[in-house]
Structure formats: structure tokens, C-alpha cells
Amino acid sequence: MSYLGTWKRYSSLINDAINIILTAFIDVFLMIKTHHSEIKNTLDNGHPQ
């Protein structure tokens, strides 16, 4: 019973960590993607959009 409680606590911590890491990864990916498209627009048009 105590083992199950410990497992639930750890699995919820691991779940939170995974969610935080995924969120951060997606944020960074979107930031890089946006930044890249801005650079591309600047190169294509000669001025930022």
C-alpha cells in the first residue's frame, strides 16, 4: 500500500516534469520557427514584416 502511494507520488512528479519539458520544448520550437520565418521574410523582402 505504501509502495503504491510512493509510486503514485513519483509518477505524478514525473508526469509534471514531462509536461513542463514538453511545454518548454514546444515554446522554444515555436520561437525558433517564428524567428526563422522573420529572417526569411527579411531576406526575401529586404525589410522585416
Image (spheres, rainbow, N blue to C red):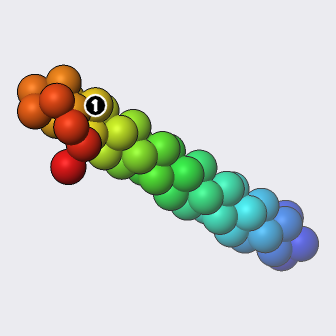
Left or right of 48? Residue 30 is right
Q: Position of residue 29 (x, y in %)?
A: 40, 41
Q: Position of residue 16 (x, y in %)?
A: 65, 64
Does residue 45 appear anywhere in the picture? yes
Instruction: Give the residue drawn at x 46%, y 52%.
Output: 27
* Residue projecting furthest to the right: 2
In this rendering, the count of numbered labels is 1
Give the residue drawn at x 21%, y 37%. 47
Q: Which residue is mark 1?
A: 39
Residue 14: image quadrant is: bottom right
Q: Quadrant of the N terminus?
A: bottom right
Q: Residue furthest top?
A: 43
Mark 1 burial class by Cα count in 10 Å: few <14, some 14-19, many 20+? some
Q: Is residue 11 above or below residue 32?
A: below
Q: Position of residue 34 (x, y in %)?
A: 31, 45
Say above or below: 6 vs 18. below
* Closer-to-camera residue (5/24): 24
Residue closer to the observer: 49 or 5 = 49
Q: Tell me if 38 is positioned left or right of 5 in this view.
A: left
| Image position of 40 with respect to 3: above or below | above
Does residue 7 appear in the picture of this structure? no
Q: Residue at x 35, y 39 (%)?
A: 35
Where residue 28 sits: x, y (%)?
Answer: 48, 44
Occupied quadrant, residue 20:
bottom right
Q: Disc 1 on helix, strand or loop?
A: helix
Q: Residue furthest front?
A: 46
**Type of amino acid under label 1:** Ile
Q: Nearer the viewer, residue 11 or 42?
A: 42
Residue drawn where x is 89% and y is 72% of the image: 2
Seen from the viewer's position, the closer of residues 34 and 46 is: 46
